[in-house]
Amino acid sequence: MNSNKKVYVGMSGGVDSSLSAALLIEQGYDVAGVYMKNWTQDLPGVKCPWADDLADAKRVAVNLGIDFKVFDFEKEYKQKVVDYMIDEYKNGRTPNPDIMCNQEVKFRLFLDAALADGADMIATGHYAQVEGNRLLRAVDDNKDQTYFLYRVTGQAMSKTLFPVGGFTKPVVRQMAAERGLSTAAKKDSQGICFVGQIGIREFLSIYVDQKPGPIVDKNSQKVLGYHDGAIFYTLGQRHGLELGGGLPYYVVGKDMAKNEVYVTTDLNDETLWRKKISLASIHWINQAPSIGRYQIRVRHRAPLVWANLSYVDNNVELELDSPERAIAPGQSVVIYDGQECLGGGIIV
């Protein structure tokens, strides 16, 4: 019986986690809500939404009649997620802080703290599904979040519930409204996962001292203009170069030591397209898959594409059926076998 199982729901103050808590109560679980206090710092011109989110989460918990707790992970979050992200950008790579947050905070710190506090399982509002210790894609392809979850462990999955993973987002909002949840119409958060309404450029500007440098045509080596910091540019980027008329330019590389950004007008430049991808920092949710054909996702919301997987030393080598554009070092590629998310690695 579910009534014997205590579930701590990570409640962010949004509609997905709010409905998750409500559904678990209806399924007979003994539910408590937990707000993870990860980041509370205001930034210039931007107020951190944490206090409002906490109030929204608490309001829903009171409405549902469940216990409500706050777990403070701010120190660990700064070390494990924020500092990691800043260091990766400093080294010219393009990291994903949401993936690191799930690996280090939600499905490690939160899970461990919840179990130590008496919970049998945890739940979140992620759009994903779990079967035993296997991570499966959500019913709503448009909202599927398994890309961000590929670095969790099978052990963590066996202790996790994803109550909204079997519904589409419109249905989730409708179900929340039917239950009178105050967050039913709350907008989804945008921007950096832990800050809210701020772009990555504005955030990095606060923590990294960047100097202007040249934007160089890759082919002619001619200086075309100047950028305000190489750290802000990523492979394949077109917007924000401000190089004037004519054909659009695309970023095809950068030299962090020289603080130079390299561009081209050739959309077919070999640097922009890769048919072979090498992955390091490999993580498998359960066991490593055998050599063979799998579907992969090269970025969140990118379509699934077919690739042949093999192993070379400690890396995974992927040979794609067709070249993919803007494969940037530091980004993650996630590997799927049908509906199951197997894991993945970081592009080198």
Image: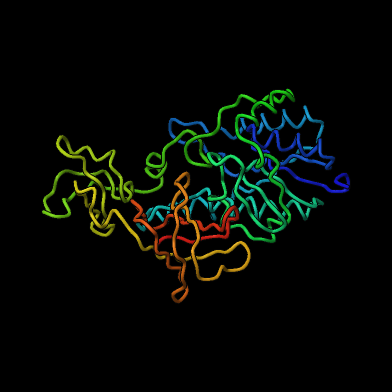
Q: For residue 4, say whether it is visible.
A: yes
In the displayed structure, does residue 18 sit left or right of residue 242?
right
In the displayed structure, does residue 204 sit left or right of residue 228?
right
Give the color scheme: rainbow, by chain, secondary structure or one colour: rainbow
Rendering quarter of residue 59: top right
* Position above or below: 105 against 289: above
* Position above or below: 318 against 331: below
Q: Quadrant of the C terminus?
A: bottom left
In the displayed structure, does residue 27 sit left or right of residue 246?
right
The residue that appears at 78% across and 46% down in the rendered structure is 7
Q: For residue 76, say whether it is visible.
A: no
Q: Which sits in the foreground, 197 or 185?
A: 185
Rendering quarter of residue 308: bottom left
In the displayed structure, does residue 64 sit left or right of residue 322?
right
Measured from the top left, where is residue 125 in percent x and y? 65, 40
Measured from the top left, where is residue 171 in percent x and y? 64, 30
* Position above or below: 344 against 46: below
Measured from the top left, where is residue 43 in percent x and y? 46, 36
The residue that appears at 36% across and 54% down in the rendered structure is 327
Q: Residue farthest to the bottom?
A: 313
Rendering quarter of residue 19: top right
The residue that appears at 76% across and 36% down in the rendered structure is 23
Q: Which sits in the foreground, 335 or 79?
A: 335
Measured from the top left, where is residue 110 in percent x and y? 68, 51
